[in-house]
Image (cartoon, rainbow, N blue to C red):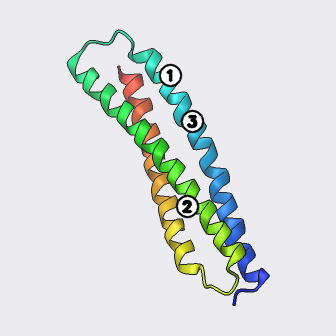
Amino acid sequence: MLTETQQQPLLTEANVWIEKLVPYVHNINDLKNKFYKWAAGKSDHDVLVQIEHYHNQFHIQLINLHDLKHAIRLHMKEVNFNTDTDHSANHAQLDEQFNFLVKDLDQLIADFNKFIAEN
């Protein structure tokens, strides 16, 4: 059985994950708006291919953000309500997913900004 002191670090870290993911949602939405304004009137085939790529990536990553935030919130509920269960394995899996998604998002943002600057 987990004590409150054992649960609290899991809940605290999960809250930090949520707090760090929310700005990514806003950032991706801002980039999408910037992107749609920039993309208007573009006709070069290679640029159009990249436009489709980034359009798809922004959509996919927003879904990934939503899904991970949902999974983290479910985990937090489980930790709160099932105090007799060891949640460390699920927590470690979510930590891995969080780090992987943040790395992907940072790379997408960097690649997109480079693409916009070069075109």
- Give the answer, above or below, for where 2 lies relative to 54: below
Q: Are marks 3 and 1 in contact (CB under 8 Å)?
A: no
Q: Rounded to the nearest whole Å, what is the CA distance between mark 3 and mark 2?
A: 21 Å
Question: Dot 1, how many residues are within 10 Å of its Cα: few (below 14), some (14-19), or many (20+)?
Answer: few
Residue beneath the point at 69% across and 90% down: 1
Q: Secondary structure at mark 1?
A: helix
- The answer to whether 43 appears left or right of 108 in the picture is left
Q: Which residue is mark 2?
A: 71
Q: Rounded to the nearest whole Å, what is the CA distance between mark 1 and mark 2?
A: 29 Å
- The answer to whether 28 appears left or right of 18 in the picture is left
Q: Secondary structure at mark 3?
A: helix
- Give the answer, above or below, for where 95 lies relative to 48: below
Residue beneath the point at 53% across and 74% down: 90
- Give the answer, above or below, for where 106 lies relative to 39: below
Residue 27, numbered label: 3
Residue lying furthest bottom = 1
Q: Amino acid at mark 1?
A: Lys
Question: Dot 2, how many residues are within 10 Å of its Cα: few (below 14), some (14-19), or many (20+)?
Answer: few
Residue beneath the point at 32% across and 12% down: 42
Residue beneath the point at 47% across and 54% down: 101
On the question of residue 106 being in view, the answer is no
Q: What quarter of the picture does the C terminus occupy?
A: top left
When asked about the image quadrant of residue 83, the answer is bottom right
- Give the answer, above or below, for where 117 lies relative to 68: above
Residue lying furthest top = 41
Q: Which residue is mark 1?
A: 34
| Residue 113 percent across, percent down from the top left | 44, 30
